[in-house]
Image (cartoon, grey):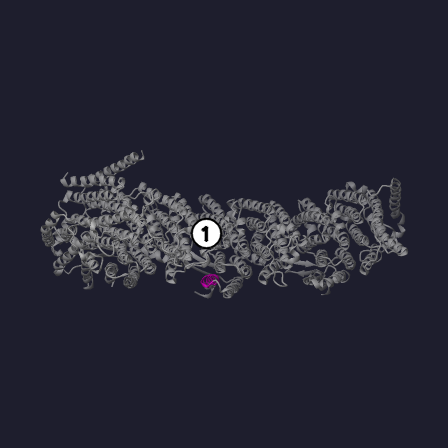
Amino acid sequence: MTRVLAILTVTAVCFAFLSGLVYSIWQIGATTTPVDLPALLAGNLDDSGVENPVTAVLLNFRSYDTLLEIGVLVIAGIAGISVAKTSSLEDPELRTSDELLYALQRWLVPLTLLLAGYLLWAGSDRPGGAFQAGAVLAASGVLMRLGGIPMDFLRPGLMLRLGLSLGFSVFLLVAVASALSGSRFLAYPPEMARTLIVAIETVLTLSIAMVLLALFVSAPINNAEEPEEGGS
Amino acid sequence: MTPFLLYALAGAALCSIGLFGFILISHLLRKLLAFNLMGSGVFLVMVGLAQHRSGPDPVPQALVLTGIVVAIAATALAVVLIRRYYHLSGKTSLEDPAQNPPPAPGPRQAREAPHE
Amino acid sequence: MTLWLMAGLLFTPLAWAVLTLLTGFRRGRAITWLGIVIQVLVSLALWAVVAAEGGFQYPLGGWQAPLGIELRMDGLAVTFVLLTALVAAASGLHAGFYLDPDKDWHRYFWPLFWFLWAGLNVVWLGNDLFNLYVGLELISLAAVGLVALGGQSEALRAAIRYLMAALLGSLAYLLGVALFYGQFGSLSLSGIASALNQDIAVEGSGFALILMFFGLALKTALFPMHRWLPPAHGIARSPVSALLSALVVKGSFYIAARLWLELGATLGSLALAQLLGVLGGMAVFWGGWQAFRHSKLKQVVAYSSVAQIGYLFLLFPLTWNTTEAVIIQAQQAMTLQVISHALAKAAMFLSAGNLILSVGSNRLNALAGVSHFLPFSLFSFGLAGVSLMGLPPTGGFAAKWLFLQASLATGQWWWLVVLLGGGLLSAAYVFRVYRASFVEDSDIDHFFHPSRRLEIIPMILALLSLGLGLMAEPVLSVMALAFANGEGT
Amino acid sequence: MITASLLLMTVVLPLGSLLLAFRQRWQKVYLYSLPLLPVPALLAGLNAELQNWLELPWLLLDGTWGLDDLRQSFLLLTSALWATAGIYAIGYLNTRKLRAFCVFWALTLTGNLGLIISVDLASFYSFFALMTFAAYGLVVHEGTAEANRAGRVYLTIAVAGEMALLTGLLMAAQHADSILLTELPGAIANYDRSWLIIGLLVSGFGVKAGLPFLHFWLPLAHPVAPTPASAVLSGAMIKAGLLGWLVTLPIGELSLPGWGNTLVVLGATGAIGGAMLGMMHIRPKTILAYSSISQMGLITLMVGAAMANAAQTATLLTAITLYALHHGLAKGCLFLSTAIKMPAERRSRRLVWLLIGVPGLSLAGLPLTSGAAAKLAMKDALKPEQYDFTLAEHLPLIMSAGAVATMLLIWRFFWALHQSVRTGPNHRCTWLGWLFATGCSLVAVWFLPGVWTHSGQPWFVLTASEGWSLIWPILIATAMSIGWWIARGRKGSGVD
Amino acid sequence: MTATALLPVFALMTSLTAAVIIFALPEQKHRLRTFVNLTAAILKLLLVGLMIRGVFQGKAYGIAFPMIPGVEFVLRADALAMLFAGLSAALWLLTTVYSVGYLENSPNRSRFFGFFSLCVASTLGIALAGNLFTFFLFYEMLTLSTYPLVVHRGTEQALRAGRTYIIYTLAGGAVLLFGIASLHVLSGDLPFRPGGHFADMAPDLQMPLTIVFVVLIAGLGVKAAIVPLHGWLPVAMVAPAPVSALLHAVAVVKAGAFGIVRVVFEIYGLETAGALGLLSGLAAIAAFTILYGSVMALYQSDLKRRLAFSTVSQVSYIILGLCLAGPVGVAGGLVHLVHQGVMKITLFFCAGNYAETLGLHRIDELDGAGRRMPGTSVAFTLAAFGMIGTPPLAGFITKWTMGTGALAAGMDWVIAVLVVSSLLNAAYFLPVLRRIWFGEQKDPWREERQWGRSETSAWLLWPPLVTAGFLLLAGLLASAPFSPLGWVELIITREVNL
């Protein structure tokens, strides 16, 4: 009975939400924006160092967002490995000995690596970029992991942590360097913008892949735990 | 009425469905999926609504990209936590622990009082 | 000079997060100390700059507002930056001694701590709606990570619940941002505010505002949406609880307040304002009552946060459609409440941690006879409690006083019930703790004295919250100046 | 200068004597010093310049002390009585609770003397209160259940009286806008609600003075106190109430026939009713206490007359003073005699009985005694033709009835004393004190100021010449007593 | 920042600093703590004495700085302030001495003395507060610092008393805060000013001002133990004797009464308050309280409870005095502030002595205590008679001045109240005295402690003797220049414009 009631209530709430949202969208769709950001963007695209406006926004105009976004990712990674088993990442249950998968892996992994590289490179002038590349890279890692390929660098050790933080650190270093050189935080010198962006994208790709992979791999099986403070 | 507005409206619908699931489902992984559904809805609204008038707009696209990363990070973290929670308590939902205490696999005794 | 300071402010936490990620707990601690010193100095310097010269905008990457992200460094922001520096420094220092260095997972405390700090600074300075979203997520995930750090299933349960609430809140907020962007084509808060001032049609944006408020209120744990907070804050390590209660919930509230102050006049409505106020009032009573009922020390403190947060939401009804003077008063009240609650609650959680460490139990009645041993921490707890009760001369009192003034000036007498009754209710739960410590019939003869380092930190915080009441005027003068500046831009 | 120091010493010496109470060992010394305590007062009474106010601006609410005619007489009476009773006390008291007795004695003494020399209200009231409360200690000194009960009654009524006084004095002082007692009567006279003040004052002081219906404590408290204390209670302290009336009531300012009537009725009731009630008792001290009520009733008559006719104030005051002196000394004497143990030897016993008898008869107005003088003075002052208030014409009758009643009561006392007296040796000081008191009552009284300055003719002589008018009530009463005695003897019943 | 500005601050700091030092001292350092305590107390007495002299010569001491927007923190020493400050400083010294003796060999002394000093600091702050806001600040500080003292023993009963106490006082504080805030909204930050601020108020302010007055009095009335807000006082007597002494005599109830004085005199002004018809109502309540407290005291068999109800009754004398609204009546009320303090502290000291030395708590156990403890009993007797209003003690001066004032104001019924109250006082004090002095000791003393030849510890004996001496002198020398009455008259001529 309560269940039905709960469903009814939630349905009503969701419906109200939906109608409010639709009404809003409808209303907003009928107005014009006071600020034309795309035009502004197009006007400044040349100074950004990349041709693809999305990448320009991501890594130049709103690079702060991206920096923080990577930060979020790193946090997730940290939090993930913080609950991971300390000694080994080997989880026998996760290992499959599927022949087909193994064969597929041998083909797919190099392909995905290539794809990742392309995506990264393409990012500067068409859709693509560090995140997409990183995701693809991570996917190949997952495949390898499922195939039972040991990946020692994923043990929670310095290597893993270095890997996690690499992209972020480089990004940050660039940001700080720009500040140190007298300009503002995160302001790239125009002549170096493209180089820097590419460099950042590259390390980011690695880091993103690393984080995603680590989160996938860090199977929390350790029994080490901490009781609540003064817990009884 | 451009297709973009349709996207936005579809996003709204996704949001509502996601919300419904998010509230009602107690299984944590499914709840998380509902959340992701909702997230997608939001991203659709964001892009659709912005592009409805001025055509392709890279800014919301970039925002959505960022948003996706954030959502993925959150999802991944949630999954990790949920897995560990499951591992420790054997449960997949946040039911009231008062009613059925967790069959904890032998939680260690409370930290010894420092004086002992 | 200012540029350097800004770079320092933004850079240090992020960089230190990376640095501490690469090291173990002990080295991380040493590094953190250095970072704390830098952060505090930078914050102080910035505060001095703003106090002397007024606020300024800081376009990141050199890109001006609609296109790039501009940070807004006004008096309010810098005050919160400074507050964050103080509380975070205290919590960080405390954690350095409080956490067990031999537990491997504690090394991750430091990076999470620094990311949290960074996220908070993002929020205080943010003027870009989407940037604020990212900042919120940064805070939320770091906070969840901290709650879950090495915890048992209960801690994980709390963390998951917290995470779910935070995610839902973020999405609601993001949806609002999406609608706003669709409406105004801009993400800059001040840009939207100036667009609103030009009298454009705003049909439908009210819903966006409501969505954002819903999301933010959920993250702030406003009354009916508060249920995630007590488990999370109660079960986390004490320094973490201190950070969460003192700062994290304030982040989302701060955004809500900024939104309201910039956009509320046009997009808000009387009903919304009163609704938020009423929910705040109910939070005060419900939280107070729950705090009174709970038997675990940290749960009491956590529920007290729910109650104290309720006061903050009085800002909305008290600034709706009224005179400039009253608005200023309400803002000042809110600011003081944020600051004093942050200081007091941090002091309270830290000292609660010390007390738990001392008696080896989380239960309230385990405190029997503790005052016998004159623990410093009990004093700190008590002093902080005074501020929560809103008794003079604490900051809590100053805030309450200003809220009272604003309520009376706007004729909204019903808030008096909240302010005065809430004060009494908080007295009830605070005195329950005192009372427990005065019980003489237990014959405990062992009492572990935590190191003085652990005890002195909450004491300083408590004294600061006490002194805030006496020093409210100078502190507020910087803030008031900033509001005036901020409005024009 | 001397006046000032004597006045100060009057109060300071008894108060200072309290220091002797600090050590248990000193209590004997303290006891022996009791007779000395009123000495400065006695000297002051004899030597002080009259109307020479001593200003004590720091004291209470601006203190003023001093003596005038009235106060001088009262001071002499009081101090003499206290001194003799003090001597008596040395012999009377056993060692039990000596220290407590001495302390309350000294305090009561201080109050009693102090109120006499006070000219300002605050001091007066202070001393009055001190006396009232300290006397409680004397009343309950024996610690018996009876004493405690008496003490309780005493205190209850006394406190009520104090409050009436406080109220009356407050109102009077507020109206007079002065704290000086000398200003009060005039102020009260001019006050439109003077009846209230007068009523309060009459009843307030009436408690001390044993006014009928306020007297209940008196026959209870006076007998249970140690004998020397009873003597001063009945002899001196009761007069404090009278003094209070005299200094506060608007006597001589205003004729208030209504109050005259009231007081006369009360006085008559007291004089006759007191005696009647006393007749029913067999304890000598109780009988004496009722006698005090009766005697005070007679004095009340005079006060009433004075209230009724402002013109007669001067004569009446003299008469009142004289009567008070006489009664105080005689009553003190009689009280002291109640605890005298009879010598075994027959002749000595007769002598003792004689010495007891004379003050008794003096009360009844035996010629050549102070009682006779007092009676004559009273008669003189209360001649009905001088007054025009309603009850004035009944005054002689009342006085005669009073005289008869007095004598009857005295016989009753003698009889009761005879029943209860024991034989045995007396302490030296007991003898001394008693003899001293008797001496005062019979002899020294004639040398007191105010006694021998009336119209050039000494009272002593006058009493002899007016012998008959004094004697007949005595005779009637004696006859009645004998008749009753015979009747009772025939019936052979015991005590009533 | 001249000396004149800093003197009040210094005076305040002495006890605050003492509190801090004491808290920091280890529990075992008894002698050092006693030294710190006494030094601070003496120092403070000196400072206050200095200020009293200065104020007498017409100097003004004070300091003010803004605290919260629109509100100033004001410390100011005027004659009225010095009345209260002098009382608290003098009695602090004595109570400290007493407490040292009383708490000998008991645990938690560090805590006790620390809060004790805080409590005194708050009292001084209340005295020196220059506006309602500052007053409130210290008023609440007082509440907090007395709580640990009330529950000091940590027994179930003490804790319950503490709860009652804190519920009452905090609720009162909340009400007071509401009143102050409302007043602030109506008319801004109001410093205490002789004659008040509303001499010529707008007619439309009348209604709100009346309401605010009622609210303020209700808030202050809790501490002043006005019926029906007095419930905490008899309960709080479970505290250790010096605490009760302090609560009843100086700190808490006086804070309430003093606040009412400030509000009536220096916020509203007597005339305005009278014109609004507020004084008669207040007078009626005060009169009722006086009688009610006395009647209740009659029924108590516990000595301290009886004293507590006596306080309920006596404190309202102060308030009743104000309502007489004439120079004399007001003087009576004000002087009772001091007199009641001295008398009641003596009584509580003595009650404490009986309890501590002989283990006597109930009145019917006191039989014969006078012989065993004459010094204490003499002090008790003097104080009790003072309470009854017997001349020449301090209480008489109060009663006399108030009575005269009542008559001058044409409020004759007040006399009746005074008389009935005195009778009741007599009715509940005299039996106690009778038992002490004339009762025969029936049972051996419950828990007698020996102190050699002396009746009790000198630390315990002297404070009541000194206060008893005070109350005797306060009455005897009432007309001397620095007597309480003399000082009150100075206040009246200088600061109460009548």
How many marks the image carries: the answer is 1
Magenta stretch: includes residue E15: yes
Among the 4 quarters of the image, the one containing residue C36: bottom left
Q: Is residue D4 visible?
A: no
Quarter of the picture containing the N terminus of chain D is: bottom right
Vertical comparison of E440 with E51: above or below: above
The image shows residue D435 at horizontal and vertical percentages of 83, 58
Amino acid type assigned to the residue bearing label 1 in the image: Arg
- Determine whether the residue tagged by mark 1 lies in a helix, strand or loop: helix
Among the 4 quarters of the image, the one containing residue D336: bottom right
Magenta stretch: includes residue D278: no
Chain assignment, label 1: C
- Say left or right for C334 vs E303: left
**Toward the viewer: E317 or E98?**
E98
Q: Which residues are magenta?
A: E11-26
* Mark 1 neighbour density, 10 Å: few (under 14) some (14–19) many (20 or more): many
**Toward the viewer: D452 or C126?**
C126
Q: Is residue A225 visible?
A: yes
- Say left or right for E232 vs D484: left
The image shows residue C432 at horizontal and vertical percentages of 44, 50
**Toward the viewer: D24 or C69?**
D24
Quarter of the picture containing the C terminus of chain D is: top right
The image shows residue D151 at horizontal and vertical percentages of 71, 49
**Toward the viewer: D128 or D175?**
D128
The image shows residue A26 at horizontal and vertical percentages of 20, 39
- Say left or right for E95 vs C386: right
Q: Main secondary structure of the magenta part?
A: helix
Would you name the residue on which mark 1 appears? C435
